[in-house]
Image (tube, helix red, strand yellow):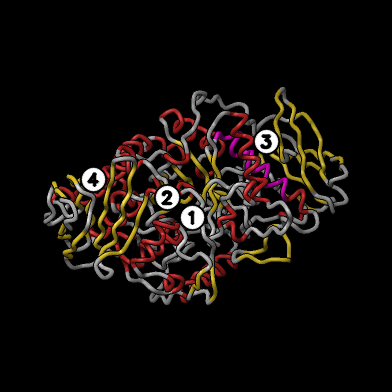
Amino acid sequence: MQIGSRYLGNGQCHFIVWSPLSQQVELHLVSPEDKLIPLEKDDQGYWQTTIAAEPGTLYFYRLNGEVDRPDPASQSQPQGVHGPSEVVDQGKYTWNDGQWQGIPLDDWIIYEMHVGTFTPEGTFDAMISRIPELLELGVNVIEIMPIAQFPGDRNWGYDGVYPYGVQQSYGGVDGLKRLVDACHQQGMAVILDVVYNHMGPEGNYFSQFAPYFTDRYKTPWGSAINYDDAYSDEVRNYFIENVRYWLSDYHLDGLRMDAIHAIYDFGAKHILQEMADAANQIAQETGRKIHLIAESDLNDPRIIRSSEAGGYGIHAQWCDDFHHSLRTILTKESHGYYADYGDLDHLARAYRDSFVYAWTYSPSRKRKHGSSAIDCPTTQFVICSQNHDQVGNRMLGDRLTEVVSFEALKIAAAAVLLSPCIPMLFMGEEYGEEAPFQYFVSHGDPGLVEAVRKGRKEEFAAFHAEGEAPDPQSEDTFQRSKLNWDKRHEGKHKTLWQFYQTLIRMRQQIPALAHKDRDCLEAIVLDNEQVLMLRRWFQDQEVVCLFNVHQKPVELSLSLADGNWKKLLDSSDAIWGGSGSPTAEIVTVQPSQPQTFQLNPESVVVYSK
């Protein structure tokens, strides 16, 4: 059932809100005229009416004749999270993407971005001018961090309290549509990060309407959403309709679902399966390729297995094991959950099996963790070397650029983009952005601001971070996190950008790299843990990638297939800002004759047969 205000045209609008335990609910129109309209209640606890109301009408719902509250399914909050909701005409925008059919999941190259810090203006419209350069890089999907209405005008987005609302400071409803439309016309897909595991604290009036939350479970961010307790049917409807809303009304190509391990549902049909069913139905109706991606730390392949195979049918999921394996090798960090990683064999296992922990003992958890996912295609796993969490949740928000050498940045790029999984870049990494990405909020409640500050300090203590964390409430923290976009034309920044562009083109154009079957991949550790060899093949073409992650040169003897091998890439070549490569351009391998390779410190070399 569609909920919220739905403009029907001809000056008519339907209002419907779920409040099963209320004795009385009235629609309070506050603009353009002040008026109270009683609503009728049905057997499921929905209150509704159809009246004369134009787009732009501002309204509250009055509960039990006592308090006015915004619509839980508000599509627009022009006066902020505590103000009235606004009637929106979703049909007034004229779309120009009628020929758009989407991009196959196997071909996705994702670019994660935050609207407020991606441009100086921090708006949807300002993003449009940068799309051609992302396309030139080779990116074909942008992933937008949450834009559901949140308190104030700056926030990561995970404190949103109106899952149907579009953040006003970013450009609101029409701004988002203009961005998606422009992307589709240029060949770029758009997915949105949505939060279905909790809601933010400020402006959260949901409990006053209905049992949206349950005390059965707790999340790290507040009360768990009620997906399987009493009254949960209509809570599920609220979020399933939210999936439909974003995919239909905004033509989005998919959703990235935040921290689904904190979505608790022990019913026979999981809410994630119902969401996947809804997305698949819209894909069939529109002829567009639509995909849901889950963030999860469970290492549970049921999330992405089909419903026929006993899974939830989500199309892909983030693979933290790959990130953690790669990062700990490059940085030697071992605090917190990084203690579970650090061996080169972990990265080899992530290439081969996706999950490093597949019902194996996890030292940080002190128990077995995960399950095997080798039956799942590699293109159901999204991997990265950086993302908003792994940068922004560091105390200083420092990027990999500030932690490792320039040579190691090139290893990180190659490790991700030469993988058969779906690669994701975090905005700015492609040119080695040096500005931090720090945690920022603009709450209006002083008590809540202090609670956020305290919570951040406690979180950093768990990772043994020293020093003073930036104030998340300060606007300076937000301003420091904006990209220095023009740096991509300068010095090593330009070189790194071109390195990323070259890797993406190799991934798309070389058959052995374009073919992503798990059965056509080998990843092993050579020469006493010094070098990782990634070998990929398709038909008679083969590619070998040699990663020396250590700060010393390595000489190794390697048995390759007979024939001529051509060097496609060497990160230590002068063209890539390196000191010069000792490896040959052409290597001829004789039968049963191992070949000697000399690898520079912190380098990656790619050969093709």
Q: Nearer the viewer, residue 106 or 110?
A: 106
At numbered mark 2, what does the secondary structure look like: helix, strand or loop?
Answer: helix
Q: Nearer the viewer, residue 539 or 485?
A: 539
Residue for point 69% across, 66% down: 217
- CA distance for labels 1 and 2: 8 Å
Q: Amino acid at mark 2?
A: Arg
Residue 244 colored magenta? yes
Taken as a whole, is the magenta stretch helix, strand or loop? helix
Q: Which residue is mark 4?
A: 608
Q: Which residue is mark 2?
A: 518
- CA distance for labels 1 and 3: 48 Å
Chain-order first, disc 4 or disc 2: 2
Q: Amino acid at mark 4?
A: Ser
Q: Residues within 10 Å of mark 1 (few under 14, many from 20)?
A: some
Q: Nearer the viewer, residue 146 or 362?
A: 362
* Occupied quadrant, residue 51: top right
In the rendered image, residue 241, in percent from the top left (x then y), is placed at: 68, 42
Q: Residues within 10 Å of mark 2 (few under 14, many from 20)?
A: many
Q: Which residue is mark 3?
A: 87
Relative placement, left or right, of 72 versus 286 is right
Q: Amino acid at mark 3?
A: Val
- CA distance for labels 4 and 2: 19 Å
Q: Given contact means CB atoms under 8 Å apart, are the residues at marks 1 and 2 in contact?
A: yes
Relative placement, left or right, of 543 versus 75 is left
At numbered mark 1, what does the secondary structure look like: helix, strand or loop?
Answer: loop
* Occupied quadrant, residue 342: bottom left
Q: Which mark is residue 374?
A: 1
Chain-order first, disc 1 or disc 3: 3
